[in-house]
Structures are given as structure tokens and as C-alpha cells.
Image (cartoon, grey):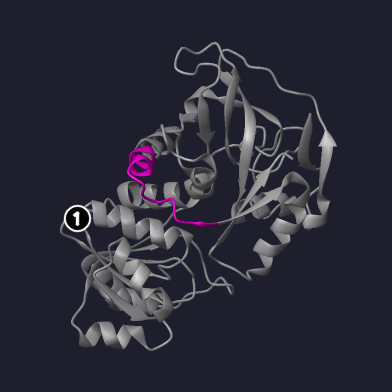
Amino acid sequence: MKAVIFDDFGSPDVLRIADVQRPVATTATVLVKVMAVAVNHVDTFVRSGTFKTALAAPHVAGRDLVGEVVASSQPDFQIGDQVWTNSMGYEGRMGATAEYVAVPTDRLYHVPDGVAPMPLVAAVHSAATAAIVLNDVMEICSGQTLLIEGAAGNVGRKLIQLAHQMGVTVVITASPRDFARCQQLGSTACYDYHAGFADQLTTDQWTFDHVIDTSGRVPLAINLALLRLGGQVTLITAPQDNQFEFPVRQFYMSQQRITGFVISHATVDQLAQAASRLNRAFSAGLLLDDQVSQRYFKDAAQCHAQLEAGTDHHQRFVLLPS
């Protein structure tokens, strides 16, 4: 069968299509015929060696796939079922960008009836990140206030929708061209991230239980100053220079917290709980608004290069086998 593999860590050019042995279903896995695979920034981290993890041999790229069950000994997964997963290609598991993938049963989820597979697979990485951040990292509650910076991006839009569903007051920063869309998704107030938004928030007397910067470009000191007593800043990315400065005395006297989250460290239970929540949202027509660019396995290296160039933060690449 055909798969996108890399023999050594390096630039996108190390990716190539190769013939590899087709896997088989076991008592712990289900064999899935792949329909489509999403390409994520984290895939570039694994390919380049930036994210250190055990890799299966051969090194098949990718983690998120949607497909059809073709072999299974599990009563919960029947031949012909459409399924998805979002945690392949690291910690020793086979990658997703292959014609067939053997997926562990505890990492495999059904595609809800009536939900199109392409928008689903494009959404699952950012949507699962948002769900786990809200539920397990922030432990956010109805009635709390959340500031999402860079909210028009893939993760930001998912955070808006899920937090709004939970009864959270959502305030966002974005480009003004994205304000109407963010309000449709559930934001209460919108601020231009180019125009001194922190001063405007202070003038409007906003304080927050939680702040999350999806871009990594807002100084940590600014976000801490916007928190209430006991508030929390959550990091899902970091500034390019890998440095933050903030007033430590003010931080500890306000009993504030800084937490980080990387979905590659999510537990099987966290992923399963997120998948259940996402499937309910998908069934309701939520979270499926990504701008999808359909490509093919042969285009994997080009997609990795475009992601690393950062030319379009909203576009989602989805690869088809052929």
C-alpha cells in the first residue's frame, strides 16, 4: 500500500510516498481504509524532530484521519462503519497518512450520522484541543469570563463555540473583519488586536477568570494584568523568542496561575471525553466551519512547507490517498 513516510528528521523534503506493508487488525486494533487525513502544525514538529516522541517503523506521517472499517474483531466497530481518530503517528503508533491504518480501539470514534467526513477530519485537532483546554486545563464553569486572543483562528473559533455552549461569557480579540463571525459563534464583545486592546478592555472594566492567547504574541504581563484574583492564563503556544517577562510579586499575591497544554500529552480518557463532546457538537452542525483545502498524499511536503511558512493561519489542509 502507499504511505507518506520520512526516513530521517528534516525539512518537508524528507517526506516521500513509499510502498509499505499493509497492517492487519488485531484484538486491540481496527483496520481502517483511509478516506482523508488532516495536516497539522504538530505533524511538522514530529517530522522535523522538534517534538521528541517514539516513532513506529516505517515513520508514517500524520495523526488525524477519517475512514471506513474494513476489518475488526470488536463489536463496537463493524465493517463499513465510518470512523475517525486524532492520535496516531506518535508514542510508537503508526502514522495516519497511509491507505490503510490499524487504529487502537480506545483511540477510534464513530463519525456521527449525517456528518461529512472532510469537514470533520479538518476540525478534530483544533476542536479536541479546545475541548480539553476548557474542560481539563481551565476547568471552566458557567458564569465565568474568558478572553480568547486571536480568536478567528482554527482553535479560537472552536473555543468560542464550546465555551458559549457552557454558559461562559466570551470576549475575543481578532481583526475587525472577523468580528461578525466571532459574534455569530458566541462572543459577547470583540476588540481589535492591532489597536491597544488591553487598554480598551481596562477602560471597559473587563476582568477575566481565564485568558488564552492562541498566537503566542501577547506579552504574558498584559494577560496577567487582565485576570481577576485567582485567575488563570493558559498557554497552547509560545513566543518565537521563547521568553516572557512578568511581575512575579503581583502574580503570586493575586494567586494567579499559568498553565500549558499540548494535545500530544492528552490521556486516552481525555481524548475519548473530548471525542464524545465533539461528536455531539458535529451532529448539531457546530465546529465544522474550517476553510478546507483538499490535496493528495503526493502534496504532503508542500502542505508541510506552507504550514511552516505561516502564510494562512485559517486554511486547513486535508490529504486524500488519490
Residue 312 on image: x %, y % = 59, 68
Tally of numbered tags: 1
Residue 163 on image: x %, y % = 28, 56
Using the image, determine if residue 47 lies above or below residue 221: above
> Residue at 21% of width from left, 77% of height from top?
206
Residue under label 1: 167
Tell which of 9 and 128 is nearer to you: 128
The answer to whether residue 154 of the structure is visible from this angle is yes
Q: Quadrant of the C terminus?
A: top right
- Which amino acid, by three-letter code, is at mark 1? Gly
Tell which of 111 and 146 is nearer to you: 111
Residue 288 painted magenta: yes
Quadrant of residue 21 within the rendered picture: top right
Residue 318 on image: x %, y % = 62, 49
- For label 1, the SS is loop
Using the image, determine if residue 74 lies above or below residue 22: above
Using the image, determine if residue 276 lies above or below residue 46: above
Q: Quadrant of the N terminus?
A: top right
Residue 162 painted magenta: no
> Residue at 52% of width from left, 34% of height from top?
84
**Range covered by the magenta-colored residues:** 277-291
